[in-house]
Amino acid sequence: MESHSRGLDWDCHHCVHIRQNAYVAQNVGRTCCSSGRRVRSVASLHGTYAIHAQGTIVGQLPPPFPAPPFPFGEAGIVKLDGAGMVLSGKSTVNLGGVVLQPTATGSYTVNSDCTGTITIKSSAGFVLHDSIVVTDRGRRTVEVQTDPFTVITRTLEKIED
């Protein structure tokens, strides 16, 4: 464990702050290493997850999309294989009133500190990139899309092994 000022220790590579001689003082989302189990690899993400995303498109997209900025919303499901591959995904996406139902495949990484990336190839013709944090022993992710034309946050919540 690495000690820091103000009497805080950091455990599980900064996922959970633990006050010395006390219980968990702060929880980032849900911990990535509940019950001492550390999330350290792509194997932590496997099964079917519900997708929820919202945000704003800030860069111009090709027609039929409106001029930016405009709102973005998404709900769907994605299946992850536990070996770094996005096997399949499907969602309903609303881009400023233009509704699409794309499918997706891709890949993902998970680092030893519970962070990682997801790259999605959408049937709508986009390649999308998210930075992620894995929480709750792989049952959930919190994400931000890193493409310059978006300000979008996304969560994945496990619904099936």
Image (spheres, helix red, strand yellow):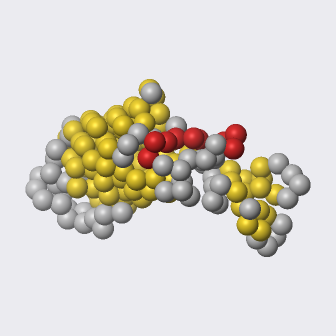
| Quarter of the figure with residue 156 | top left
Q: Is residue 21 left or right of residue 33?
A: right
Residue 52 horizontal/vertical position (percent): 41, 41
Residue at the image position 89 percent from the left and 55 percent from the top:
21
Residue at the image position 46 percent from the left and 53 percent from the top:
110
Residue at the extreme top of the image, as rendered: 160
Numbered marks: total: 0
Q: Quadrant of the N terminus?
A: bottom right
Q: Out of 82 and 7, give the one closest to the viewer.
A: 82
Residue 61 visible in image: yes
Residue at the image position 12 percent from the left and 59 percent from the top:
62
Residue 28 horizontal/vertical position (percent): 63, 52
Image: 110 above or below 140: below
Residue at the image position 47 percent from the left and 33 percent from the top:
158
Residue 35 horizontal/vertical position (percent): 70, 40
Q: Out of 94 and 160, give the one closest to the viewer.
A: 160
Residue 67 horizontal/vertical position (percent): 20, 62
Q: Is residue 128 left or right of residue 62?
A: right
Image: 108 above or below 43: below
Residue 72 visible in image: no
Residue at the extreme right of the image, as rendered: 21
